[in-house]
Amino acid sequence: MVNHIGDLVVRRRVAPAVRYGLIAAGVALVVLGGAGLFWWGESAAGYDVGHAARDEVRAHARIAHLRHEVKRLSAQLAMSKRLLQSGNVAYAALSSALKKSDERRMHLKERLGFYKTVLGASKTAKRLEIDGFRVVRAASGWRYHLVLVQPFAANRWISARVHLAVQGQSAGRSSGASATSLVDVPREVHFKYFDEVRGPLNLPANVIPQKVVVRVVSGGQVATHSYPWPDPTPPGPRE
């Protein structure tokens, strides 16, 4: 209400507390209005604070579960790797054992065939005989393998002396069987049905061998046979 007294205008004074209250009320209205508009905007956009909070909780729980699952699977993978390594070692050992077993079986099979052949030769032998002879390569040079048999029906022990003479070319000239530089040291043998005689054949460097003469003497019995020297070109069997 305004009172006019001449040109003097008198206005009613407002108390400071009321003025500050009005300002505070205005600010509060502005804040509430902004918050309301913000919440209305979120609601209009389909955003729910409570739902988002629940989703965040579930997401943290899912992350914790996945981390635990990763640790469990990592431990399981490490165990599987150790089991696989152990299995590979066991398989390698088993494979090696089976290979050795097969080799042993083949060796025994060959020896059985050899014994059957030699015993068959012993049954048909009429006297002391040379059943087989061969020369094979070895790491240190050459070795020989001699098989002797006597009649199976004799059923007695026999002693014999084995002489090996290598014939060939020495310094471009033929060498006879009696050349001492080409003769292996004689061997004494003692057997009943058959015997295998093995040993080295040491040749001088300037000798080109051509054949080996095998002579076995036992009392009044003498068995002699000559065998060609193996071709040095192919590798041939090794002993």
Image (cartoon, grey):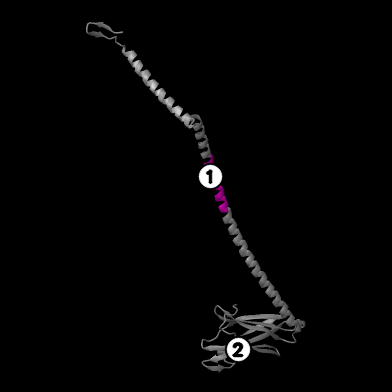
Is 105 colored magenta in this rendering?
no
Place of residue 69 in the rendered image (x, y in percent of width and height, measured from the top left): 55, 43
Q: For the view shown, which residue lies furthest in the left direction?
A: 7
> Magenta region, mostly helix, strand or loop?
helix
Q: Nearer the viewer, residue 217 or 120?
A: 120
Q: Is residue 123 left or right of residue 182?
A: right
Say which quadrant the N terminus sits in.
top left
Q: Quadrant of residue 25?
A: top left
Q: Nearer the viewer, residue 79 or 70?
A: 70
Which residue corresponds to the image point at 53% horizontal and 42% vertical from the top-left? 66
Residue count near mark 1 (Cα–Cα under 10 Å), binned few <14, some 14–19, many ≥20: few
| Disc marking residue 28 | none
Look at mark 2 in the image and give the residue it sits on: 211
Is 172 placed left or right of 134 in the picture? left
Query: Which residue has dot 1 on it?
Result: 70
Q: Is residue 109 above or below residue 71?
A: below
Magenta stretch in the rendered image: 65-82
The amino acid type, in three-letter code, at marker 2 is: Lys
The answer to whether residue 156 is visible is: no
Q: Is residue 207 above or below residue 140?
A: below
Can you tell which quarter of the image residue 139 is in?
bottom right
Image check: 38 left or right of 20?
right
